[in-house]
Amino acid sequence: MKMYEMGRLLAEPLLPPLYKQVRARLRKLIQTNFDSPRILDVGGRKSPYTIGLPALVTVMDLPRRSEIQQQLNLGVDDRIIEQIRHRRSNIENVVLGDMTCSGLPDEAFDLVVSVEVLEHVEEDERFVSEVWRVLKPGGMFLMTTPNGDWVENKNPDHKRHYKKKQLNQLLEKYFADVAVEYAIVGGSCRRLGLKSWSLSRPDTIALSMVGNVVNGFQSAHATVKNKATGTHHLFAVALKQ
């Protein structure tokens, strides 16, 4: 394991609960269903969600070309690709491309991960159909997206925010077994946890860590998955039978 991976694993308890929950669910899916799976991380950029997992990971993202991509830290360029390969020990490939027309082979992956990506995609149904195509039978799709039942869309690059029912209907067009839940409680602790970390502001780092720990406890409660109001994300897991 490389130094960067070790650092991320050590820092994990202090990072935002969305990150921790995605990681926990991925570990559980791998433990329960797969042995050294091949994972496609769509929109992974620096790919923090699949760091250190016992898997072969392919990162796929759009090339960084537009001003909005630059401003919002979206897409990848040659520098980011080199950084991904340098920092990670489980990277099998980095692919520049669009998941709506990926060109990837059929039934090539055991897991597809897409964290806060689908809301950026105009042709969302084509995206989901491509995920289904590249998954092996018995493969799983894990994704998150903003909770459209609660979160207003103010992001210039977001095409839509899905309500839970809408996301269910979209995924069920291709997957026979779909589970969609609400996740991550909002409020002051969540806002505090999302503040940027800067070595010049250790006080802000400390407050952000505290916010993430508290928000992690808030978001871990069993009732959160059914709470449409006050939650900021949707989690979905879909099985290809």
Image (cartoon, rainbow, N blue to C red):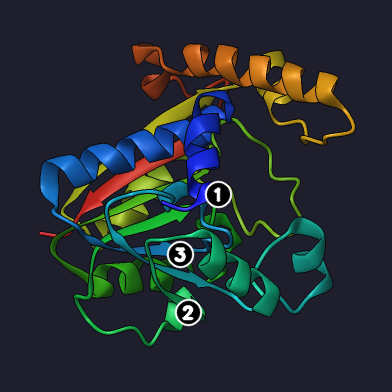
**Alpha carbons under labels 1 and 2: distance apart:** 21 Å
Q: Is residue 28 left or right of residue 152?
A: left
x and y percentages locating residue 138 in the rendered image:
11, 58
Looking at the image, tell me whether mark 1 or mark 3 is earlier in sequence order.
1
Label 3 element class: strand
Q: Report the residue at 10% width, 59% height from top.
A: 241
Q: The disc labelled 2 sits on which kind of residue? A: Val
Please identify the residue farthest to the right as the structure is shown. Answer: 200
Residue 53 in the image: above or below residue 130: above
Question: Which disc is residue 95 wearing?
Answer: 2
**Front residue of this view, candidates 140 and 166:** 140
Mark 1 Cα-neighbour bin, 10 Å: few <14, some 14–19, many ≥20 = some
- Residue 233 shows in the view: no
10 Å crowding of disc 3: few (<14), some (14-19), many (20+): many
Residue 237 relative to residue 76: left or right: left
Q: Secondary structure at mark 1?
A: helix
Disc 1 and disc 2 in contact, CB within 8 angstroms: no
Disc number placed over residue 4 in the picture, else none: 1
Q: Amino acid at mark 1?
A: Tyr
**Is residue 209 something that shows in the picture?**
yes
Dot label at residue 230: none
